[in-house]
Image: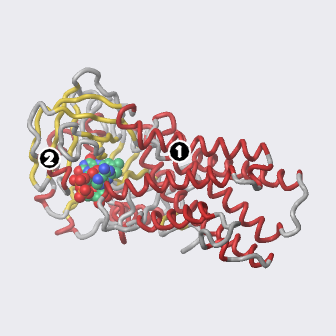
Protein backbone atom coordinates (compact mmCIF):
# COMPACT_ATOMS: atom_id res chain seq x y z
CA UNK A 1 0.00 0.00 0.00
CA UNK A 2 1.55 3.31 -1.03
CA UNK A 3 0.83 6.68 0.56
CA UNK A 4 -1.54 7.43 -2.30
CA UNK A 5 -3.69 4.40 -1.65
CA UNK A 6 -5.99 3.70 1.24
CA UNK A 7 -7.83 0.40 1.63
CA UNK A 8 -6.76 -0.61 -1.89
CA UNK A 9 -8.35 2.52 -3.36
CA UNK A 10 -6.40 5.42 -4.76
CA UNK A 11 -6.89 8.58 -2.75
CA UNK A 12 -9.29 10.94 -4.48
CA UNK A 13 -7.01 13.34 -6.31
CA UNK A 14 -6.58 16.93 -5.23
CA UNK A 15 -7.27 18.21 -8.76
CA UNK A 16 -10.53 16.34 -9.26
CA UNK A 17 -11.87 16.80 -5.71
CA UNK A 18 -10.56 20.25 -4.79
CA UNK A 19 -13.65 21.63 -2.90
CA UNK A 20 -14.13 18.31 -1.09
CA UNK A 21 -10.50 18.28 0.03
CA UNK A 22 -10.71 21.95 1.06
CA UNK A 23 -13.74 21.08 3.21
CA UNK A 24 -12.02 18.03 4.72
CA UNK A 25 -8.58 19.50 5.34
CA UNK A 26 -10.11 22.83 6.48
CA UNK A 27 -12.27 20.98 9.03
CA UNK A 28 -9.29 18.96 10.27
CA UNK A 29 -7.27 22.17 10.59
CA UNK A 30 -10.00 23.89 12.64
CA UNK A 31 -10.21 20.84 14.91
CA UNK A 32 -6.44 20.79 15.42
CA UNK A 33 -6.15 24.54 16.03
CA UNK A 34 -9.00 24.48 18.58
CA UNK A 35 -7.49 21.48 20.35
CA UNK A 36 -4.11 23.28 20.51
CA UNK A 37 -5.83 26.44 21.81
CA UNK A 38 -7.50 24.35 24.51
CA UNK A 39 -4.07 23.08 25.55
CA UNK A 40 -2.55 26.57 25.73
CA UNK A 41 -5.48 27.89 27.70
CA UNK A 42 -5.50 25.47 30.58
CA UNK A 43 -2.64 23.94 32.46
CA UNK A 44 -1.64 20.91 30.41
CA UNK A 45 -1.73 17.70 32.45
CA UNK A 46 1.79 16.37 33.11
CA UNK A 47 1.06 13.11 31.27
CA UNK A 48 -0.26 14.81 28.12
CA UNK A 49 2.59 13.77 25.84
CA UNK A 50 2.76 11.64 23.92
CA UNK A 51 -0.13 9.19 24.34
CA UNK A 52 -2.91 11.30 25.80
CA UNK A 53 -2.35 14.02 23.22
CA UNK A 54 -2.36 11.43 20.42
CA UNK A 55 -5.52 9.81 21.79
CA UNK A 56 -7.33 13.15 21.97
CA UNK A 57 -6.29 14.27 18.51
CA UNK A 58 -7.10 10.94 16.89
CA UNK A 59 -10.65 10.85 18.26
CA UNK A 60 -11.29 14.48 17.31
CA UNK A 61 -10.00 13.88 13.77
CA UNK A 62 -12.11 10.74 13.58
CA UNK A 63 -15.29 12.67 14.44
CA UNK A 64 -14.34 15.38 11.94
CA UNK A 65 -13.79 12.89 9.10
CA UNK A 66 -16.97 11.00 9.89
CA UNK A 67 -19.04 14.21 9.79
CA UNK A 68 -17.66 15.06 6.33
CA UNK A 69 -18.11 11.42 5.20
CA UNK A 70 -21.77 11.57 6.20
CA UNK A 71 -22.27 14.89 4.44
CA UNK A 72 -20.76 13.43 1.28
CA UNK A 73 -23.52 10.87 0.78
CA UNK A 74 -26.47 12.96 1.89
CA UNK A 75 -27.89 13.06 -1.68
CA UNK A 76 -28.61 16.79 -1.44
CA UNK A 77 -28.35 18.75 -4.67
CA UNK A 78 -26.86 21.69 -2.76
CA UNK A 79 -23.82 19.61 -1.82
CA UNK A 80 -23.23 18.07 -5.25
CA UNK A 81 -20.89 20.87 -6.42
CA UNK A 82 -18.69 20.36 -3.35
CA UNK A 83 -18.07 16.72 -4.15
CA UNK A 84 -18.44 16.98 -7.93
CA UNK A 85 -21.60 14.85 -8.08
CA UNK A 86 -23.05 12.07 -5.97
CA UNK A 87 -21.03 9.33 -7.68
CA UNK A 88 -17.78 11.10 -6.81
CA UNK A 89 -19.10 11.87 -3.33
CA UNK A 90 -19.64 8.15 -2.76
CA UNK A 91 -16.03 7.48 -3.80
CA UNK A 92 -14.85 10.18 -1.39
CA UNK A 93 -16.99 8.69 1.39
CA UNK A 94 -15.38 5.28 0.81
CA UNK A 95 -12.04 6.77 1.79
CA UNK A 96 -13.14 9.07 4.64
CA UNK A 97 -15.49 6.60 6.40
CA UNK A 98 -12.95 3.79 6.90
CA UNK A 99 -10.27 6.40 7.75
CA UNK A 100 -12.50 7.68 10.58
CA UNK A 101 -12.83 4.14 11.93
CA UNK A 102 -9.07 3.57 11.70
CA UNK A 103 -8.50 6.78 13.66
CA UNK A 104 -10.93 5.54 16.28
CA UNK A 105 -8.97 2.29 16.59
CA UNK A 106 -5.79 4.37 16.90
CA UNK A 107 -7.50 6.40 19.62
CA UNK A 108 -8.22 3.30 21.69
CA UNK A 109 -4.63 2.08 21.27
CA UNK A 110 -3.32 5.49 22.41
CA UNK A 111 -5.68 5.47 25.42
CA UNK A 112 -4.31 2.04 26.36
CA UNK A 113 -0.73 3.30 26.00
CA UNK A 114 -1.57 6.31 28.17
CA UNK A 115 -3.05 3.99 30.79
CA UNK A 116 0.12 1.90 30.64
CA UNK A 117 2.25 5.06 31.00
CA UNK A 118 0.28 6.14 34.10
CA UNK A 119 0.15 2.69 35.59
CA UNK A 120 -3.67 2.61 35.53
CA UNK A 121 -5.72 -0.50 34.70
CA UNK A 122 -5.70 -1.45 30.98
CA UNK A 123 -8.90 -3.39 31.68
CA UNK A 124 -10.68 -0.03 32.01
CA UNK A 125 -9.87 0.67 28.38
CA UNK A 126 -10.93 -2.63 26.82
CA UNK A 127 -13.38 -4.32 29.15
CA UNK A 128 -16.77 -2.78 29.84
CA UNK A 129 -17.74 -2.63 33.53
CA UNK A 130 -14.15 -3.61 34.52
CA UNK A 131 -14.26 -1.03 37.30
CA UNK A 132 -16.26 2.03 38.29
CA UNK A 133 -14.01 4.28 36.20
CA UNK A 134 -14.36 2.23 32.97
CA UNK A 135 -16.30 4.18 30.30
CA UNK A 136 -18.38 1.13 29.60
CA UNK A 137 -20.82 2.70 27.14
CA UNK A 138 -17.97 4.08 25.02
CA UNK A 139 -16.23 0.71 25.05
CA UNK A 140 -19.41 -1.10 23.98
CA UNK A 141 -20.05 1.48 21.24
CA UNK A 142 -16.48 0.96 20.02
CA UNK A 143 -16.88 -2.83 19.75
CA UNK A 144 -20.21 -2.41 17.99
CA UNK A 145 -18.59 -0.03 15.52
CA UNK A 146 -15.79 -2.51 14.86
CA UNK A 147 -18.33 -5.26 14.26
CA UNK A 148 -20.42 -3.12 11.90
CA UNK A 149 -17.29 -1.81 10.15
CA UNK A 150 -16.18 -5.43 9.55
CA UNK A 151 -19.65 -6.42 8.30
CA UNK A 152 -19.57 -3.58 5.77
CA UNK A 153 -16.79 -5.53 4.01
CA UNK A 154 -18.76 -8.79 3.95
CA UNK A 155 -19.40 -9.20 0.24
CA UNK A 156 -21.86 -12.06 0.69
CA UNK A 157 -24.38 -9.70 2.23
CA UNK A 158 -27.23 -8.44 0.07
CA UNK A 159 -27.08 -4.79 -0.95
CA UNK A 160 -30.09 -3.81 1.16
CA UNK A 161 -28.65 -5.49 4.28
CA UNK A 162 -25.31 -3.83 3.60
CA UNK A 163 -27.09 -0.46 3.47
CA UNK A 164 -28.81 -1.22 6.79
CA UNK A 165 -25.42 -2.01 8.35
CA UNK A 166 -24.13 1.32 7.07
CA UNK A 167 -27.06 3.21 8.50
CA UNK A 168 -26.58 1.60 11.89
CA UNK A 169 -22.85 2.31 11.75
CA UNK A 170 -23.55 6.03 11.25
CA UNK A 171 -26.03 6.04 14.11
CA UNK A 172 -23.71 4.27 16.56
CA UNK A 173 -20.87 6.58 15.61
CA UNK A 174 -23.01 9.65 16.22
CA UNK A 175 -24.37 8.29 19.50
CA UNK A 176 -20.88 7.37 20.71
CA UNK A 177 -19.55 10.81 19.81
CA UNK A 178 -22.37 12.63 21.57
CA UNK A 179 -21.81 10.54 24.65
CA UNK A 180 -18.03 11.12 24.59
CA UNK A 181 -18.57 14.86 24.12
CA UNK A 182 -20.79 15.30 27.15
CA UNK A 183 -18.48 13.37 29.45
CA UNK A 184 -15.93 15.54 31.30
CA UNK A 185 -12.74 15.96 29.24
CA UNK A 186 -11.02 18.19 26.69
CA UNK A 187 -14.13 18.81 24.58
CA UNK A 188 -16.35 19.78 27.49
CA UNK A 189 -13.63 21.95 29.06
CA UNK A 190 -13.04 24.33 26.17
CA UNK A 191 -16.13 26.06 24.84
CA UNK A 192 -14.92 26.89 21.27
CA UNK A 193 -13.86 23.26 20.75
CA UNK A 194 -17.17 22.05 22.18
CA UNK A 195 -19.12 24.37 19.87
CA UNK A 196 -17.13 23.12 16.86
CA UNK A 197 -17.76 19.50 17.82
CA UNK A 198 -21.46 20.25 18.21
CA UNK A 199 -21.49 21.80 14.72
CA UNK A 200 -19.81 18.70 13.29
CA UNK A 201 -22.20 16.39 15.10
CA UNK A 202 -25.21 18.40 14.00
CA UNK A 203 -23.98 18.33 10.40
CA UNK A 204 -23.36 14.56 10.55
CA UNK A 205 -26.61 13.95 12.44
CA UNK A 206 -28.69 16.05 10.05
CA UNK A 207 -27.08 14.29 7.09
CA UNK A 208 -27.90 10.88 8.58
CA UNK A 209 -31.45 11.89 9.46
CA UNK A 210 -32.17 13.28 5.99
CA UNK A 211 -30.50 10.46 4.10
CA UNK A 212 -32.00 7.60 6.13
CA UNK A 213 -35.38 8.86 7.30
CA UNK A 214 -36.45 11.71 5.06
CA UNK A 215 -34.96 11.15 1.62
CA UNK A 216 -37.66 8.78 0.35
CA UNK A 217 -40.32 11.36 1.18
CA UNK A 218 -38.52 14.69 0.79
CA UNK A 219 -35.74 13.93 -1.72
CA UNK A 220 -36.13 15.54 -5.17
CA UNK A 221 -38.54 13.14 -6.86
CA UNK A 222 -40.94 13.01 -9.76
CA UNK A 223 -43.88 10.79 -10.52
CA UNK A 224 -43.69 8.96 -13.80
CA UNK A 225 -45.85 6.31 -15.43
CA UNK A 226 -44.43 3.40 -17.38
CA UNK A 227 -45.11 3.60 -21.11
CA UNK A 228 -43.33 0.47 -22.28
CA UNK A 229 -40.74 -2.09 -21.39
CA UNK A 230 -38.67 -2.81 -24.48
CA UNK A 231 -36.70 -6.07 -24.40
CA UNK A 232 -33.35 -5.44 -26.09
CA UNK A 233 -31.94 -8.97 -25.83
CA UNK A 234 -28.97 -10.15 -23.80
CA UNK A 235 -30.81 -9.57 -20.48
CA UNK A 236 -31.28 -5.90 -21.20
CA UNK A 237 -34.47 -3.84 -21.17
CA UNK A 238 -35.43 -0.24 -21.79
CA UNK A 239 -37.97 1.34 -19.48
CA UNK A 240 -39.70 4.24 -21.17
CA UNK A 241 -41.74 6.43 -18.85
CA UNK A 242 -43.82 9.58 -19.07
CA UNK A 243 -44.22 12.30 -16.43
CA UNK A 244 -47.49 12.27 -14.50
CA UNK A 245 -47.28 15.96 -13.63
CA UNK A 246 -43.90 17.75 -13.54
CA UNK A 247 -41.16 16.64 -15.84
CA UNK A 248 -37.64 16.22 -14.47
CA UNK A 249 -35.01 18.48 -16.06
CA UNK A 250 -31.58 16.95 -16.27
CA UNK A 251 -28.20 17.03 -17.93
CA UNK A 252 -27.22 14.14 -20.20
CA UNK A 253 -25.00 11.69 -18.36
CA UNK A 254 -26.73 12.01 -14.99
CA UNK A 255 -28.37 9.16 -13.13
CA UNK A 256 -31.53 8.75 -11.08
CA UNK A 257 -32.75 6.44 -8.35
CA UNK A 258 -35.78 4.44 -9.40
CA UNK A 259 -38.46 3.30 -6.99
CA UNK A 260 -41.48 1.20 -7.84
CA UNK A 261 -44.06 1.98 -5.12
CA UNK A 262 -46.20 -1.03 -6.09
CA UNK A 263 -43.39 -3.60 -6.04
CA UNK A 264 -44.32 -5.74 -3.07
CA UNK A 265 -41.50 -6.36 -0.64
CA UNK A 266 -39.20 -3.98 -2.51
CA UNK A 267 -41.34 -0.85 -2.56
CA UNK A 268 -38.82 1.12 -0.52
CA UNK A 269 -35.77 0.18 -2.56
CA UNK A 270 -34.04 2.89 -4.58
CA UNK A 271 -31.81 1.68 -7.40
CA UNK A 272 -29.51 3.94 -9.42
CA UNK A 273 -29.67 3.96 -13.23
CA UNK A 274 -28.17 6.34 -15.78
CA UNK A 275 -30.53 8.16 -18.09
CA UNK A 276 -30.18 6.94 -21.65
CA UNK A 277 -32.64 9.45 -23.12
CA UNK A 278 -31.97 13.01 -24.21
CA UNK A 279 -33.06 15.82 -21.87
CA UNK A 280 -34.95 17.40 -24.76
CA UNK A 281 -37.36 14.45 -24.85
CA UNK A 282 -40.40 14.43 -22.64
CA UNK A 283 -40.18 10.73 -21.91
CA UNK A 284 -37.43 9.31 -19.79
CA UNK A 285 -35.61 6.18 -20.79
CA UNK A 286 -33.57 3.89 -18.55
CA UNK A 287 -31.57 1.07 -20.11
CA UNK A 288 -31.17 -1.72 -17.63
CA UNK A 289 -29.36 -5.01 -17.41
CA UNK A 290 -31.41 -7.49 -15.43
CA UNK A 291 -28.87 -8.83 -12.97
CA UNK A 292 -30.78 -9.41 -9.71
CA UNK A 293 -34.17 -9.46 -7.99
CA UNK A 294 -35.09 -5.83 -8.49
CA UNK A 295 -34.00 -5.48 -12.09
CA UNK A 296 -35.57 -8.82 -13.09
CA UNK A 297 -38.88 -7.71 -11.66
CA UNK A 298 -38.65 -4.50 -13.70
CA UNK A 299 -38.76 -6.62 -16.85
CA UNK A 300 -42.19 -7.92 -15.82
CA UNK A 301 -43.78 -4.51 -15.15
CA UNK A 302 -46.87 -3.65 -17.14
CA UNK A 303 -47.58 -0.33 -18.90
CA UNK A 304 -49.14 2.37 -16.68
CA UNK A 305 -47.26 1.16 -13.58
CA UNK A 306 -46.51 4.10 -11.28
CA UNK A 307 -42.82 4.87 -10.86
CA UNK A 308 -40.89 7.37 -8.80
CA UNK A 309 -37.72 8.90 -10.09
CA UNK A 310 -35.30 10.61 -7.67
CA UNK A 311 -32.68 12.89 -9.06
CA UNK A 312 -30.96 13.83 -11.21
CA UNK A 313 -27.56 13.12 -9.64
CA UNK A 314 -23.96 12.69 -10.67
CA UNK A 315 -20.99 14.45 -12.14
CA UNK A 316 -20.64 12.48 -15.37
CA UNK A 317 -22.14 15.39 -17.26
CA UNK A 318 -21.41 18.03 -19.90
CA UNK A 319 -20.46 20.41 -17.09
CA UNK A 320 -17.37 18.31 -16.66
CA UNK A 321 -16.60 17.76 -20.30
CA UNK A 322 -17.71 21.16 -21.65
CA UNK A 323 -14.16 22.61 -21.73
CA UNK A 324 -12.90 19.60 -23.65
CA UNK A 325 -13.59 19.69 -27.37
CA UNK A 326 -12.06 16.28 -27.98
CA UNK A 327 -13.38 13.27 -26.16
CA UNK A 328 -12.74 9.56 -25.99
CA UNK A 329 -15.84 7.87 -24.55
CA UNK A 330 -15.57 4.21 -23.55
CA UNK A 331 -18.65 2.37 -22.32
CA UNK A 332 -18.37 -1.26 -21.30
CA UNK A 333 -21.50 -3.41 -21.53
CA UNK A 334 -24.42 -1.61 -19.90
CA UNK A 335 -21.94 1.20 -19.15
CA UNK A 336 -22.86 2.53 -22.60
CA UNK A 337 -26.10 4.02 -21.18
CA UNK A 338 -24.95 7.54 -20.19
CA UNK A 339 -23.27 7.87 -23.59
CA UNK A 340 -26.56 7.04 -25.32
CA UNK A 341 -28.15 10.01 -23.52
CA UNK A 342 -25.21 12.26 -24.34
CA UNK A 343 -25.21 11.24 -28.01
CA UNK A 344 -28.96 11.72 -28.26
CA UNK A 345 -28.40 15.21 -26.91
CA UNK A 346 -25.56 15.87 -29.40
CA UNK A 347 -28.16 15.40 -32.15
CA UNK A 348 -30.02 18.48 -31.02
CA UNK A 349 -27.46 20.83 -29.50
CA UNK A 350 -25.72 21.95 -32.74
CA UNK A 351 -22.39 21.71 -31.01
CA UNK A 352 -19.22 20.58 -32.66
CA UNK A 353 -16.92 18.20 -30.89
CA UNK A 354 -14.54 15.48 -31.89
CA UNK A 355 -15.78 12.29 -30.27
CA UNK A 356 -14.41 8.78 -30.35
CA UNK A 357 -16.95 6.35 -28.95
CA UNK A 358 -15.94 2.81 -27.98
CA UNK A 359 -18.64 0.31 -27.13
CA UNK A 360 -16.93 -2.61 -25.42
CA UNK A 361 -18.91 -5.87 -25.30
CA UNK A 362 -18.07 -9.54 -24.87
CA UNK A 363 -19.53 -10.55 -28.23
CA UNK A 364 -21.79 -9.23 -30.99
CA UNK A 365 -24.97 -10.52 -29.31
CA UNK A 366 -24.25 -8.33 -26.28
CA UNK A 367 -23.99 -5.20 -28.43
CA UNK A 368 -27.68 -4.44 -28.06
CA UNK A 369 -27.29 -0.69 -28.66
CA UNK A 370 -24.98 -1.01 -31.66
CA UNK A 371 -27.73 -0.53 -34.27
CA UNK A 372 -29.23 2.42 -32.39
CA UNK A 373 -25.83 4.14 -32.26
CA UNK A 374 -25.07 3.54 -35.94
CA UNK A 375 -28.52 4.44 -37.25
CA UNK A 376 -29.30 7.42 -35.05
CA UNK A 377 -26.43 9.22 -33.41
CA UNK A 378 -23.73 9.28 -36.04
CA UNK A 379 -25.76 11.95 -37.87
CA UNK A 380 -24.96 14.51 -35.14
CA UNK A 381 -23.04 17.65 -36.14
CA UNK A 382 -20.23 16.63 -33.87
CA UNK A 383 -17.70 14.50 -35.63
CA UNK A 384 -18.15 11.04 -34.14
CA UNK A 385 -16.01 8.00 -34.77
CA UNK A 386 -17.64 4.87 -33.46
CA UNK A 387 -15.88 1.60 -32.70
CA UNK A 388 -17.67 -1.55 -31.57
CA UNK A 389 -15.16 -3.59 -29.57
CA UNK A 390 -16.25 -7.23 -29.04
CA UNK A 391 -13.57 -8.66 -26.75
CA UNK A 392 -14.30 -12.16 -28.14
CA UNK A 393 -12.48 -11.21 -31.37
CA UNK A 394 -10.47 -8.12 -30.48
CA UNK A 395 -9.24 -9.06 -26.99
CA UNK A 396 -9.25 -6.74 -24.00
CA UNK A 397 -9.30 -3.08 -24.91
CA UNK A 398 -6.22 -1.16 -23.79
CA UNK A 399 -5.45 2.55 -23.54
CA UNK A 400 -2.41 2.01 -25.77
CA UNK A 401 -4.61 0.59 -28.57
CA UNK A 402 -7.05 3.48 -28.25
CA UNK A 403 -4.18 5.98 -28.27
CA UNK A 404 -2.69 4.43 -31.40
CA UNK A 405 -6.03 4.69 -33.25
CA UNK A 406 -6.67 8.27 -32.20
CA UNK A 407 -3.07 9.49 -32.35
CA UNK A 408 -2.20 11.88 -30.94
CA UNK A 409 -4.08 11.42 -27.65
CA UNK A 410 -2.91 14.83 -26.49
CA UNK A 411 -5.75 17.28 -25.83
CA UNK A 412 -8.36 14.54 -25.38
CA UNK A 413 -10.43 13.99 -22.26
CA UNK A 414 -11.37 10.39 -21.50
CA UNK A 415 -14.80 9.38 -20.21
CA UNK A 416 -15.13 5.84 -18.87
CA UNK A 417 -18.26 4.07 -17.72
CA UNK A 418 -18.85 0.52 -16.56
CA UNK A 419 -17.93 -1.83 -13.76
CA UNK A 420 -15.41 -0.74 -11.12
CA UNK A 421 -12.57 -3.08 -12.11
CA UNK A 422 -12.84 -2.18 -15.80
CA UNK A 423 -12.67 1.54 -15.03
CA UNK A 424 -9.84 1.23 -12.52
CA UNK A 425 -7.80 -0.74 -15.02
CA UNK A 426 -8.33 1.56 -18.01
CA UNK A 427 -8.05 4.80 -16.02
CA UNK A 428 -4.69 3.58 -14.69
CA UNK A 429 -3.54 2.85 -18.24
CA UNK A 430 -4.56 6.29 -19.51
CA UNK A 431 -2.78 7.91 -16.56
CA UNK A 432 0.32 5.93 -17.43
CA UNK A 433 0.10 7.31 -20.99
CA UNK A 434 0.20 10.82 -19.56
CA UNK A 435 -3.50 11.80 -19.61
CA UNK A 436 -3.90 14.22 -16.67
CA UNK A 437 -6.19 13.17 -13.83
CA UNK A 438 -8.71 15.96 -14.42
CA UNK A 439 -9.14 14.73 -18.00
CA UNK A 440 -10.23 11.28 -16.89
CA UNK A 441 -13.91 11.38 -16.03
CA UNK A 442 -15.42 8.20 -14.71
CA UNK A 443 -18.76 6.68 -13.76
CA UNK A 444 -18.69 3.42 -11.81
CA UNK A 445 -21.82 1.28 -11.93
CA UNK A 446 -21.49 0.29 -8.27
CA UNK A 447 -21.60 2.23 -5.04
CA UNK A 448 -20.34 -0.68 -3.01
CA UNK A 449 -16.75 -1.89 -3.04
CA UNK A 450 -17.01 -5.41 -4.37
CA UNK A 451 -14.45 -8.09 -3.54
CA UNK A 452 -11.30 -8.11 -5.59
CA UNK A 453 -12.69 -5.54 -7.99
CA UNK A 454 -13.03 -2.80 -5.42
CA UNK A 455 -10.21 -0.63 -6.70
CA UNK A 456 -10.87 2.60 -8.49
CA UNK A 457 -9.00 5.55 -9.80
CA UNK A 458 -11.06 8.64 -9.12
C1 LIG B 1 -24.32 5.60 -10.62
C2 LIG B 1 -24.87 4.26 -11.12
C3 LIG B 1 -25.49 4.19 -12.34
C4 LIG B 1 -25.99 2.97 -12.79
N1 LIG B 1 -26.59 2.92 -14.02
C5 LIG B 1 -27.05 1.73 -14.49
C6 LIG B 1 -27.68 1.65 -15.77
O1 LIG B 1 -27.83 2.64 -16.50
N2 LIG B 1 -28.13 0.43 -16.18
C7 LIG B 1 -27.97 -0.70 -15.41
O2 LIG B 1 -28.41 -1.77 -15.82
N3 LIG B 1 -27.40 -0.64 -14.19
C8 LIG B 1 -26.93 0.54 -13.71
N4 LIG B 1 -26.36 0.60 -12.47
C9 LIG B 1 -26.28 -0.65 -11.66
C10 LIG B 1 -27.65 -0.93 -11.01
O3 LIG B 1 -27.95 0.07 -10.06
C11 LIG B 1 -27.66 -2.30 -10.31
O4 LIG B 1 -27.34 -3.28 -11.27
C12 LIG B 1 -29.01 -2.61 -9.73
O5 LIG B 1 -29.29 -1.76 -8.67
C13 LIG B 1 -29.02 -4.08 -9.30
O6 LIG B 1 -30.15 -4.36 -8.51
P1 LIG B 1 -30.74 -5.83 -8.37
O7 LIG B 1 -31.53 -5.92 -7.11
O8 LIG B 1 -31.41 -6.25 -9.61
O9 LIG B 1 -29.46 -6.74 -8.27
P2 LIG B 1 -28.74 -7.35 -7.00
O10 LIG B 1 -28.43 -8.78 -7.30
O11 LIG B 1 -29.41 -7.03 -5.73
O12 LIG B 1 -27.42 -6.53 -7.05
C14 LIG B 1 -26.43 -6.67 -8.03
C15 LIG B 1 -25.39 -5.60 -7.69
O13 LIG B 1 -25.98 -4.31 -7.92
C16 LIG B 1 -25.67 -3.42 -6.86
N5 LIG B 1 -26.91 -2.89 -6.24
C17 LIG B 1 -27.98 -3.60 -5.81
N6 LIG B 1 -28.90 -2.80 -5.29
C18 LIG B 1 -28.40 -1.56 -5.38
C19 LIG B 1 -28.88 -0.26 -4.99
N7 LIG B 1 -30.04 -0.09 -4.40
N8 LIG B 1 -28.09 0.80 -5.23
C20 LIG B 1 -26.89 0.65 -5.81
N9 LIG B 1 -26.39 -0.52 -6.21
C21 LIG B 1 -27.12 -1.60 -5.99
C22 LIG B 1 -24.85 -4.18 -5.86
O14 LIG B 1 -23.50 -3.80 -5.98
C23 LIG B 1 -25.02 -5.62 -6.20
O15 LIG B 1 -23.86 -6.34 -5.95
C24 LIG B 1 -25.86 1.80 -12.00
C25 LIG B 1 -25.24 1.89 -10.75
C26 LIG B 1 -24.74 3.10 -10.31
C27 LIG B 1 -24.08 3.18 -8.97
Could you say whether the residue bearing mark 2 is in a helix, strand or loop?
Answer: strand
Q: Is residue 295 above or below residue 448?
A: above
Identified at 75% across, 49% down, the residue is 188
Quarter in which the N terminus is drawn: bottom right
Instruction: Please identify the residue farthest to the front as the structure is shown.
Output: 132
Q: Residues within 10 Å of mark 1 (few under 14, many from 20)?
A: many
Could you say whether the residue bearing mark 1 is in a helix, strand or loop?
Answer: helix
**Where is residue 350 drawn, in percent x and y?**
32, 29
Q: Is residue 74 left or right of residue 242?
A: right
Which numbered tag is attached to residue 237?
2
Instruction: Answer whether residue 167 is visible to the viewer in this image.
Output: yes
Q: Is residue 16 left or right of residue 114?
A: left
Numbered disc in front, either 2 or 1: 1
**Where is residue 447 drawn, in percent x and y?**
38, 54
Identified at 54% across, 41% down, the residue is 82
Q: Residue 115 occupies which quadrant of the picture?
A: bottom right
Identified at 42% across, 66% down, the residue is 455
Q: Residue 403 occupies which quadrant of the picture?
A: bottom left
**Where is residue 51 drawn, in percent x and y?**
76, 71
For marks 2 and 1, give the CA distance.
34 Å
Q: Residues within 10 Å of mark 2 (few under 14, many from 20)?
A: many
Display coloring: secondary structure
Q: Number of numbered discs present?
A: 2
Q: Is residue 27 above or below residue 366?
A: above
Q: Which circle's residue, 2 or 1, is located before the other in the chain?
A: 1
Instruction: Please identify the residue farthest to the right as the structure is shown.
Output: 43
Which numbered tag is attached to residue 71?
1
Amino acid sequence: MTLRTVFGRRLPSLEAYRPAWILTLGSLLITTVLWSAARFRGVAPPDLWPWRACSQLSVLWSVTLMAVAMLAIVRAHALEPVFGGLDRAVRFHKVLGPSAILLLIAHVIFVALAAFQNGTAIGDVFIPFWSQSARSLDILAFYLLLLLGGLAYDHRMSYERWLAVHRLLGLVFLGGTVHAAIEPGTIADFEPLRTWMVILMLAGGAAWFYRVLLFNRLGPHYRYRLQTVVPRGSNTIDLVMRPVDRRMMYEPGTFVFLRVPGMEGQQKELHPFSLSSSPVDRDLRLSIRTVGDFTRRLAALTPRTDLEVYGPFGGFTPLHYAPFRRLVCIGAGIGITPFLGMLAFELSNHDFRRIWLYYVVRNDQEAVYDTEIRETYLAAESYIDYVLWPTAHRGKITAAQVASEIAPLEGYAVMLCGQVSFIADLAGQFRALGVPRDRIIIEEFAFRVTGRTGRSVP
